[in-house]
Image: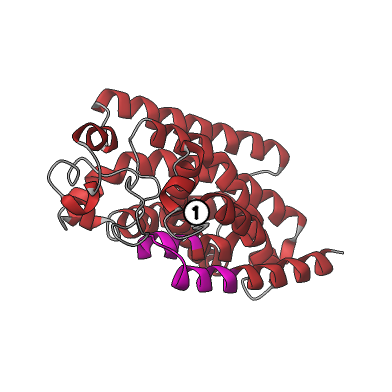
Amino acid sequence: MLTGAMLVWFILTGLSLVFVIWDSITNAPTSWVQRLAWVLVILYTGVIGLIFYLLTCRRPFPGGHDQFTRATWKQSVNSEMHCLAGDATGILIAASIVPTLGLTNGWDSIIEYLAGFVCGLFIFQALMMRNMYQGNYLKAVGKTFFAETVSMNMVMAGMIPAMVILTSLWPNSEDPSNATFWFRMSLASIVGGITAYPINYWLVKNHLKHGCMTLPGKDGAAPNLGHCSHECAPNSAPHTYGTSQAETHKMEMHSLSIMESSIWITGTFIVLFLAIYVTDKITPIYF
């Protein structure tokens, strides 16, 4: 039964991936970073990711992308794709390596967390989005650290339980040469995406993280181009094209005080530790 389910899953994932790559090339008025994030997320989450792509990101018709993606919940899904793509990539790479080290599942989880955080923050957030901060990489790291940390913690609050529990059910799923490894990581990525959505919704709603931006001039007459960072909004025409000063102000990214940021980061770590604690009661986690 598991073999049949995996076969159907991988076929649907392949078809979903082909469609999104084609659509990204022919129909997407978004940045290459956003398109890459969706391609990777659908590689990891299959047809589930495709459904959300169709609901929240795909341009329905020329000139309609900005209006179609305007709803906060859609902006939040698109925002989360940056985090999930980077984090899941780092976690998957680490998960492919840690079995060769012969460590306990607790240390495996720590290495996977660190790999996901490094890949998510330093590559998918700071490196790929540095142009939003005048090309200053270190500034991009500082500006995206808070959002990446709280989002990463919530991704792992879902992925760690899923990975650990499924490993106990499917012993061969630790081996990347086994199909169950990729199926397990896909299911874990889906769970991580679900648990991380609320914090991403909060981040986008409070203008602490970017949503889905329509590239200027790439989608006809759509005038409002989504959120823009504080660094680029006031004086940068490409990101404020067709908007009034009041609308530009609304698109600026906000920031929290160090105390507020620390409280939120601590809160997400508590949620992560609670998820690990509950998982340990189901499937023991050893160090």
Q: Residue at x 22, y 46 (%)?
A: 240
**Considering only vertical position in the picture, is 10 above or below 185?**
below
Looking at the image, can residue 248 be seen? Answer: yes
Q: Secondary structure at mark 1?
A: loop
Q: Residue at x 23, y 44 (%)?
A: 142
Front residue of 278 and 81: 81
Quick check: is 143 in the magenta stretch? no
Front residue of 73 and 69: 69
Main secondary structure found in the magenta portion: helix
- In the rendered image, residue 139, in percent from the top left (x then y), is placed at 18, 49
Asked if residue 97 lies left or right of residue 223, the reply is right
The segment highlighted magenta reads: 17-38
**Considering only vertical position in the picture, is 258 above or below 52?**
above
Looking at the image, can residue 104 be seen? Answer: no
Asked if residue 235 lies left or right of residue 81, the reply is left
Residue reaching furthest to the left = 235
Classify the position of the N terminus by image quarter: bottom right
Give amino acid for label 1: Cys
Q: Residue at x 47, y 58 (%)?
A: 85
Q: Residue at x 53, y 51 (%)?
A: 109
- The residue under label 1 is 57
The mark total stands at 1
- In the rendered image, residue 284, in percent from the top left (x then y), is placed at 67, 43
- In the rendered image, residue 105, in percent from the top left (x then y), is placed at 59, 53
Front residue of 61 and 158: 61
